[in-house]
Amino acid sequence: MLLIIPYFGSWPFWLDFFLLSCRRNPTVNWLIIGDSPAPADAPANVEFRQVAYADYLAFVSARLGIPFDPVRPYKLCDLKPMYGYLHEEDLSGYDFWGFCDLDVVFGDLRSFLTPEVLRHDVIATHDTRISGHFSLLRNTPVLREAFRRIPDWAAKVCEQKSQRLDEAAFSKLFLRYKRWPQGLRKWLPGANPLGVSTLFREQFSTPDCRIAWVDGSRDFPSEWYWRDGVLSNDRSERSFMYFHFLYWKQNHWKREYKTEGGHLARGEAQCFVPGPDCRFFRVTREGFHAD
């Protein structure tokens, strides 16, 4: 499987931790496209491709046949449903393609992406929608071009403002009646418009946001532990697929660290730089810690 991430601007300070968690998932591959130089000692399963922002926009415009010229790189999130089509040449030999974000720490992905799970064509980590921070789709012509079924997709992609195509609009191609119990959805006419096998399963990856914690409460973890490629926290003894630290990034770290070019600069939240042989780190709302 190949996860595709276009990211333009300076690398965020937590990139070393992201890459360390990728390194411990050697059977999963990432393609990161951006205008910054590749970091030193990147894992073998993560390819960095340096491309100027204007050149990437020109590539997208030519491939999709539309005038794509967003001012803010964040708009690229609307392209996530199209990554399989845009980067079809990079997908040769892969059974799945997908997308994820950089503000995550991965656990042992293969312990969650079991052969039984991979029997499905679309795999999302929320119960009721495609998850922009991690989703997988089988590498087939139908799913590479599924985005064309999004109503007015071309016009929406050309809007400067984000249209949430990666989650809201894309989800409707695979899941309707999302408020109904999962056991009943498959019996409802048109519940799965594309007729492909889907798995929507909540992984509790994004705490402190809309979705309640595993036990149904709003009592979320205050610490996450990455140990030899396995991810856990102080609220549960089970392991987790990944931790999406969106809330801490937006509500705590921004107050403490200067911004360079729209991205958080390296600072005290990082606390230390993990080497390739690092076996443990801890994440809190104060940042990343070695002990």
Image: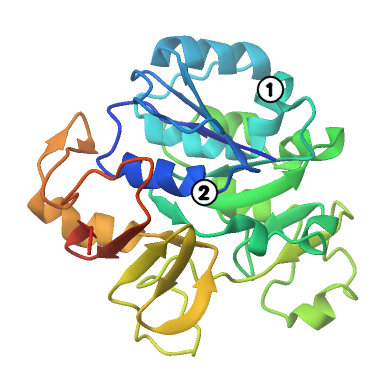
> Can see residue 27?
yes
Quarter of image, res 196:
bottom right
Using a 10 Å C-alpha cutoff, classify the residue at mark 2 as few (fewer than 14 neighbours), some (14 to 19) or many (20 or more): many
Q: Give amino acid for label 2.
A: Arg
Identify the image's colour scheme: rainbow, by chain, secondary structure or one colour: rainbow
Q: Nearer the viewer, residue 288 or 89?
A: 288
In the image: residue 168, left or right of residue 231:
right
Q: Nearer the viewer, residue 182 or 124?
A: 124
Which corner quadrant holds the C terminus? bottom left
Q: Which mark is residue 90?
A: 1
Residue in view at x 90 percent, y 68 percent: 189
Quarter of image, res 206:
bottom left
N-terminal of the pair, mark 2 or mark 1, is 2
Quarter of image, res 15:
top left
Q: Give amino acid for label 1.
A: Asp
Please tell me whether mark 2 or mark 1 is closer to you in this view: 2
Which corner quadrant holds the N terminus? top right
In the image: residue 231, left or right of residue 88:
left
Please state the horizontal and vertical placement of residue 42, each as a whole percent of the image. Answer: 42, 30
> Can see residue 213?
no
Residue linked to disc 2: 24
Judged from the image, the secondary structure of the residue bearing numbered disc 1 is helix
Q: Give me the C-alpha separation between circle 2 and circle 1.
A: 22 Å
